[in-house]
Image: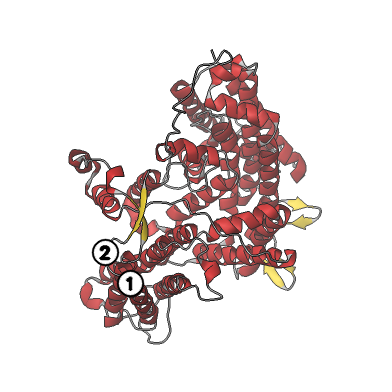
């Protein structure tokens, strides 16, 4: 793919850059004005000089744009923000401020019943943010050449729908491209400074994630998603994320410790259990997605009934944890209940995998989908009427007691460092430890001979078996290990939710966890990676939870977002190098063969 460095709007750079900076300053200033006259809109945007709600997001987008624009002047102290020197970063930051501003205008008009409810400050925010985008389009940008685009298929655009067609036409007009820019060597810093930078980066990440989880209404969360999406794209274009990635690779133990320390600090930032319950369920969902990533991401086995293994672990733990509704009437300690749930799920994984893993592709997917439904229906029928009285049918197993670990009751509040941690905070920290164990298992197995054999089977099972790999045995091992990890997460889920019922483990529902959302989390985040499913699961749990105001249109909006994302980044949000090359090999120019290559005796 050939690229060029040209502006979209033919304006001299010496004019476009100060114009963009001035417009970014004006956009930032509009956050201090009133956007509506009434406090009925969430966040109360009626005050001058005191930003609130969506105004803070516009303020952040304007400041990021301003910093990236000024870095183009090579001002000392700001050059590190754009090490690649790419103006595409400025454009994406301008898109962030404009998207939040115009979404705010639309949300105010929709919620309050018309554009008449907007104050001049809102119109100024929309105008100045639009001027910022126009100024950024006048900067020299990394763009594809017109020759590399090919002809437009207007019939295909019509079939794709108006919205998606507009998106494709915009991309063909802007022709933005990712140019391979070689970053200048970073200045050598003392090790303690580099460690401090890593800790600071994770602290900022903790603040950003906490802000997203703590958003109190859907409009603010939507604006947060718009700002976060475009800002991450801007930081990627600037090369700042590559610099941070190099630091984390250089100090991997410090980065790993900082990541889990930031995650462990989340409950201490909360004043109640309202959002730690969301965070605890996110960790359960993410841990199960990591287990599925072994099956799908490493071994390449399409499993559409994986949520059943989560249910096996949850039911097994509920039966042996002392619930009054359990017919077994025993109460194991947590470690024994966890082993019971993990072992039961692993046994079911072997029993289901042994007769079915000789199938491939769609046939295996259909069988696993059937297993998921069989599990749910079986749990419904073990009610004492249509079968033995084991699971209490549709009523499930209620009143599962809280865990006690070393005399520490997770159901009670505790003071830690003067901060009160509630029930869900305790379970969040327990689940964080289990997630760390699952991450360690995934990392060690993925880098082992078994992990490389799984990748070989995923790429070409016939060729792998021709090289001496026992495909059936290794696929069965992947199935059993993935089921075991899901069952381990299920043991905690049973205690978090108090009750285990069959309708929690379906193929598809509006809210996770279910098999469809688990598979989407792995593919969306990035197959075969560790951080990919964690990010994908977090987004797929938070988005339906926060966008409840969309009501019946929730799944429609979610589906459209997935389609656009798969069009923009089919390899996932966080992809490994293999997947990047696989999905973008058309952008890699073919290597010409030597013209004067003569056939020698050795090459004959």
Q: Residue at x 55, y 35 (%)?
A: 297
Q: Residue at x 64, y 23 (%)?
A: 474
Q: Is residue 335 visible?
A: yes
Q: Earlier in the sequence, mark 1 or mark 2?
A: 2
Is 156 placed above or below 455 here? Answer: below
Is 154 placed above or below 403 here? Answer: above
- Determine whether, in the image, residue 421 is placed left or right of residue 383: right
Q: Which mark, by number, is residue 9?
A: 2
Of residues 268 and 470, the one drawn nearer to the viewer in this rendering: 470
Q: Quadrant of the N terminus?
A: top left
The residue beneath circle 1 is 16
Q: Are marks 1 and 2 in contact (CB under 8 Å)?
A: yes
Q: How is the image coloured?
A: secondary structure
Q: Quadrant of residue 150?
A: top left
Dot 1 falls on a residue whose secondary structure is: helix
- Determine whether, in the image, residue 281 is placed left or right of residue 125: right
Residue 113: percent from left, percent from top: 23, 70
Q: Is residue 413 visible?
A: no
Residue 152: percent from left, percent from top: 22, 42
């Amino acid at each position: 793919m050939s690229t060029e460095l040209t502006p979209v709007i033919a304006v001299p750079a010496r004019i476009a850059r100060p114009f963009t900076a001035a417009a970014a300053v004006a956009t930032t200033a509009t956050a201090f004005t009133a956007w509506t006259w009434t406090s009925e809109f969430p966040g109360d945007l009626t005050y001058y000089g005191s930003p609130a709600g969506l105004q803070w997001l516009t303020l952040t987008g304007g400041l990021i744009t301003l910093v990236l624009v000024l870095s183009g002047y090579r001002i000392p102290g700001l050059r590190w923000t754009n090490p690649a020197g790419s103006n595409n970063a400025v454009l994406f930051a301008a898109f962030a401020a404009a998207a939040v501003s115009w979404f705010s205008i639309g949300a105010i008009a929709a919620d309050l019943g018309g554009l008449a409810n907007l104050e001049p400050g809102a119109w100024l925010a929309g105008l100045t943010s639009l001027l910022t985008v126009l100024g950024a389009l006048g900067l020299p940008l990394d763009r594809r050449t017109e020759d590399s685009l090919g002809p437009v298929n207007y019939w295909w655009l019509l079939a794709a729908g108006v919205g998606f067609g507009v998106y494709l036409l915009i991309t063909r007009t802007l022709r933005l491209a990712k140019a391979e820019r070689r970053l200048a060597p970073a200045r050598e810093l003392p090790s303690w400074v580099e460690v401090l930078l890593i800790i600071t980066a994770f602290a900022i990440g903790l603040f950003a994630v906490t802000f997203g989880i703590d958003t109190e209404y859907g409009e603010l969360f939507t604006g947060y998603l718009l700002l976060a999406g475009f800002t991450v794209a801007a930081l990627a274009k600037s090369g700042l994320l590559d610099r941070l990635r190099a630091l984390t690779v250089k100090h991997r133990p410090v980065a790993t410790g900082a990541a889990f320390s930031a995650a462990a600090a989340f409950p201490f930032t909360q004043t109640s259990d309202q959002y730690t319950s969301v965070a605890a369920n996110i960790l359960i969902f993410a841990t199960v997605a990591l287990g599925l990533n072994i099956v799908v991401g490493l071994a390449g086995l399409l499993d559409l009934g994986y949520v059943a293994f989560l249910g096996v672990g949850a039911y097994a733990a509920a039966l042996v944890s002392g619930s009054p509704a359990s017919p077994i009437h025993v109460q194991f300690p947590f470690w024994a209940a966890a082993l019971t749930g993990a072992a039961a799920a692993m046994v079911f994984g072997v029993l289901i995998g042994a007769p079915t893993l000789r199938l491939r592709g769609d046939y295996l997917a259909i069988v696993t989908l059937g297993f998921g439904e069989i599990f749910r229906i079986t749990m419904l029928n073990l009610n004492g009427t249509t079968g033995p009285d084991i699971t209490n049918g549709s009523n499930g197993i209620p009143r599962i007691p809280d865990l006690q670990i070393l005399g520490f009751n997770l159901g009670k509040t505790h003071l830690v460092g003067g901060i009160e941690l509630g029930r869900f905070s305790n379970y969040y920290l327990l689940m964080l430890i289990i997630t760390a164990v699952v991450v360690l298992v995934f990392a060690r197995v993925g880098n082992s001979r078994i992990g490389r054999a799984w990748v070989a089977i995923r790429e070409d099972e016939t060729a792998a078996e021709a090289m001496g790999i026992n495909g059936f045995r290794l696929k069965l091992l992947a199935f059993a290990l993935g089921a075991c990890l899901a069952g381990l997460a299920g043991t905690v889920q049973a205690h978090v939710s108090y009750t285990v019922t069959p309708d929690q483990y379906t193929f598809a529902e509006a809210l996770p966890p279910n098999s469809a959302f688990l598979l989407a989390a792995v593919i969306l985040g990035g197959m075969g990676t560790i951080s990919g499913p964690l990010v994908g699961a977090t987004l797929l749990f938070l988005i339906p939870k926060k966008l409840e105001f969309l009501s019946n249109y929730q799944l429609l909006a979610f589906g459209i977002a997935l389609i656009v994302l798969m069009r923009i980044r089919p390899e996932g949000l966080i992809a490994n190098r293999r997947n990047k090359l696989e999905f973008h090999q058309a952008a890699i120019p073919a290597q010409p063969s030597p013209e004067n290559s003569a056939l020698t005796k050795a090459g004959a």
